Image (tube, helix red, strand yellow):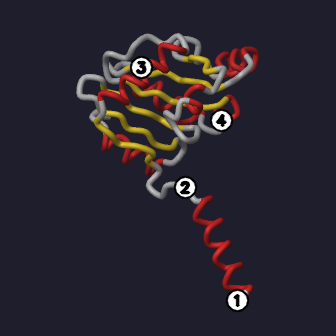
C-alpha cells in the first residue's frame, strides 16, 4: 500500500511539472482578450495595437537564451507591415537598460517593472511569443525557443512568413 501511494505521488509530480506538449498556451478569437492585452500594453507605455503585432515577452535572464529567436523575429518583420515589440519583465530599470543595450532593442523594448503581465493573469509563465490581430480579434500565445513550436505558431497565425 505504501508503494501505491508513493507511485501516485510521483505520477502527480511528473504531470504537474511537464509543460503543455504542443507549446501553445492559447489560440483564441476574443475581442475581450485583445482589449485586455491593449489595456496592459498601454499601462507599460505601449501604444494601442491597431494592426497585426507580435509580442515577445521575456525576463532579462531569458534574453540571452532566446536571443536567436528574438533576432529572427527582428529580421523577419523588418520589412513587413507587422508590428514587433519585446516586453521585458524586469523590476530594476538598470537591468532593463543593460539588456536593451546589449541586445540592441531600443526601438522595440518595453519594461514591465511590476510583472503585470503575470499578475493580471494574461499569461501563466514566460518567455513566450504572442500574436495579436485586432482586425479579426485573433490571439495566439506560444513558448519561445523551440523550432517546431515556431513553425506551428506561424501556421496558426496569418503572418504569411
Residue 38 sits in quarter: top left
Pointer 1 residue = 1
Give the CA distance from mark 3 to mark 4: 24 Å
Is the C-beta separation of discs 3 and 2 under 8 Å?
no
Pointer 4 residue = 62
Give the CA distance from mark 4 to mark 2: 17 Å
What secondary structure is found at the residue carrying circle 1?
A: loop
Residue at the spot x=23%, y=28% of the render?
136
Residue at the spot x=45%, y=26% of the render?
75
Query: Looking at the rendered structure, which numbered label has been put on residue 38?
Result: 3
Is the C-beta separation of discs 4 and 2 under 8 Å?
no
Few, some or many C-alpha atoms within 10 Å of disc 4 (few <14, some 14-19, many ≥20)? some
Give the CA distance from mark 3 to mark 1: 53 Å
Give the residue at the far front of this rendering: 1
Give the residue at the far left of this rendering: 136
State left or right for residue 34 relative to residue 18: left
For this rendering, which residue is in front, 95 or 90? 90
Give the CA distance from mark 1 to mark 2: 30 Å
Pointer 2 residue = 19
User: Which badge, 1 or 2, is on the more N-terminal residue?
Assistant: 1
State left or right for residue 120 relative to residue 92: left
Few, some or many C-alpha atoms within 10 Å of disc 2 (few <14, some 14-19, many ≥20)? few
Task: Tell me where residue 33 appears, x and y as whole percent.
Answer: 37, 30
User: Which badge, 3 or 4, is on the more N-terminal residue?
Assistant: 3
User: Which badge, 3 or 1, is on the more N-terminal residue?
Assistant: 1
Amino acid at each position: 500500500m505504501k508503494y501505491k501511494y508513493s507511485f501516485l505521488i510521483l505520477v502527480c509530480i511528473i504531470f504537474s511539472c511537464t509543460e503543455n506538449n504542443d507549446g501553445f498556451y492559447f489560440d483564441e478569437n476574443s475581442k475581450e482578450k485583445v482589449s485586455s492585452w491593449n489595456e496592459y500594453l498601454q499601462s507599460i507605455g505601449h501604444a494601442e495595437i491597431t494592426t497585426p503585432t507580435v509580442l515577445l515577452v521575456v525576463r532579462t535572464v531569458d534574453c540571452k537564451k532566446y536571443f536567436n529567436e528574438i533576432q529572427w523575429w527582428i529580421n523577419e518583420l523588418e520589412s513587413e507591415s507587422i508590428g514587433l515589440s519585446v516586453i521585458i519583465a524586469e523590476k530594476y530599470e538598470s537591468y532593463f537598460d543593460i539588456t536593451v543595450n546589449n541586445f540592441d532593442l531600443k526601438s522595440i523594448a518595453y519594461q514591465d517593472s511590476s510583472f503585470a503581465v503575470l499578475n493580471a493573469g494574461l499569461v501563466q509563465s514566460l518567455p513566450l511569443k504572442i500574436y495579436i490581430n485586432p482586425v479579426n480579434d485573433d490571439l495566439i500565445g506560444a513558448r519561445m525557443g523551440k523550432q517546431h513550436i515556431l513553425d506551428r505558431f506561424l501556421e496558426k497565425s496569418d503572418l504569411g512568413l
